[in-house]
Amino acid sequence: MATDWPGHFCPSCGAPQTAFPRYPWYLCSDCRGRTHDRDGNRIEFFNAHLFGGLGFRFAGEAQFWEIRSAICLVTRRPVLVSEARFGGVVVEPLPDRVFDFEQVTDMRRPGWRDRLPEPSGSRP
């Protein structure tokens, strides 16, 4: 049984990458580093704790928030950011339909920062 998967290319910049069937449209790490909100503020995503959880912070700031998933932008295109199954962060183009919109932080909407809860903590 062959385990080789066809080549995969970042849907944002076209860089070749390893294919993963669970995340067939994931963006490369360079594009993941270009996530930003509607105002162009760069956003960093990471695992909030040793055993998972998705966290984000604004680039250069220590305060962070824990969220379930986020819609933000990469080069002005909408993407969905979520925690990968066994840790890490995966960024994919926004699908036509987000199934659990109540638990998604939509960073494209006006006033989205005003709806954030208190920060979860801070990171160096």
Image (tube, helix red, strand yellow):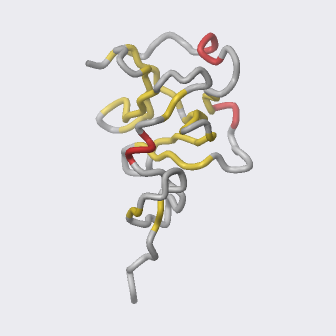
**Residue 105 shown left or right of residue 89 in the figure:** right
Residue 68, by quadrant, is: top right
**Residue 14 shown left or right of residue 124 in the figure:** right
Percent from the top left, x then y, of residue 70? Answer: 57, 34
Percent from the top left, x then y, of residue 88? Answer: 37, 44
Quarter of the image for the C terminus: give it. Answer: top left
| Residue found at x 70% / y 36% | 101
Nearer to us in this view, 105 or 76 = 76
**Residue 91 shown left or right of residue 93 in the figure:** left
Q: Is residue 5 above or below residue 111?
A: below
Nearer to us in this view, 16 or 25 = 16
Residue 54, by quadrant, is: top left
| Residue found at x 41% / y 29% | 44
| Residue found at x 69% / y 24% | 109
Q: Is residue 12 above or below residue 5?
A: above
Nearer to us in this view, 67 or 113 = 113
| Residue found at x 64% / y 18% | 112
Quarter of the image for the N terminus: give it. Answer: bottom left
Q: Is residue 71 above or below residue 85?
A: above
Percent from the top left, x then y, of residue 84? Answer: 44, 48
Percent from the top left, x then y, of residue 16? Answer: 41, 63
